[in-house]
Image (spheres, grey):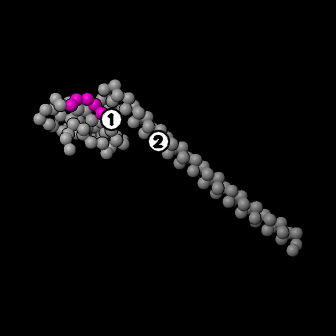
Amino acid sequence: MSKEKQKKEKFKTDEEFLNLKEETDRSEKRRKIINIVLWGILFGWIVVCFTDFILVRTEKEPIFCSFSKTTEYIDGEVTSCYGPGYKVFNYDRDSFSGIEFAPLWGKDKSVDN
C-alpha cells in the first residue's frame, strides 16, 4: 500500500471519528437538557405540594387548587379541593370539622362506608 493511500484512509477514519464524536456530543447535550428540565419539574411539583401541605397544617386554604367540589350533607358540607397529585378536604359538619391533606385516592372521612 502506498503512503498516499494510507494517508487518505487515515484521514477518512479520522473524519468518521470526528463525526461520531460530534453526534455523541449533541446527544449528551440533549440528555443533559432533558435531565435538567425533568428535575426542574419535579422540584416545582414538590414546592407546590409542600406549600399547600404547610398551609393545610396551619388550617389555611391551599393556594394551588385546580378545582373544588362541595358535597352537601344534612349537618353541613365538605369541600374537596384538587391539586396536582393531592386532595384537600375541608370538613364543616356538626359531626366532624377540620381540614385534611390527602393523596388523590384519599376519600372523604366524614362519610360512613
SS category of the residue bearing label 1: strand
Furthest residue in direction front, as rendered: 113
Report if residue 29 is visible in the image: yes
Kindly identify which residue carries mark 1.
101
Furthest residue in direction bottom, as rendered: 1
The image quadrant that residue 4 belongs to is bottom right
Q: Is residue 110 left or right of residue 14?
A: left
- Residue 73 in the image, given as x and y percentages of width and height: 14, 36
In the drawing, what numbered circle is on residue 48?
A: none
Residue in the image at 83% along x and 71% along y: 5
Residue in the image at 54% along x and 43% along y: 36
Q: Which is closer to the viewer, label 2 or label 1?
A: 1
SS category of the residue bearing label 2: helix
Looking at the image, do the residues carrying marks 2 and 1 touch, with CB atoms under 8 Å apart?
A: no
In the drawing, what numbered circle is on residue 42?
A: 2
Q: Which of these two is toward me, 18 or 65?
A: 65
Give the quadrant of the N terminus. bottom right
The kind of residue on which mark 1 rests is Phe
Q: Disc 2 or 1, which lies upstream in sequence?
A: 2
Helix, strand or loop: magenta stretch: strand
- Between the C-alphas of marks 2 and 1, the distance is 20 Å
The image quadrant that residue 76 belongs to is top left
- Residue 75 in the image, given as x and y percentages of width and height: 13, 32
Q: Is residue 59 above or below residue 36?
A: above
Magenta span: 96-101
The kind of residue on which mark 2 rests is Leu
Q: Is residue 68 left or right of residue 57?
A: left
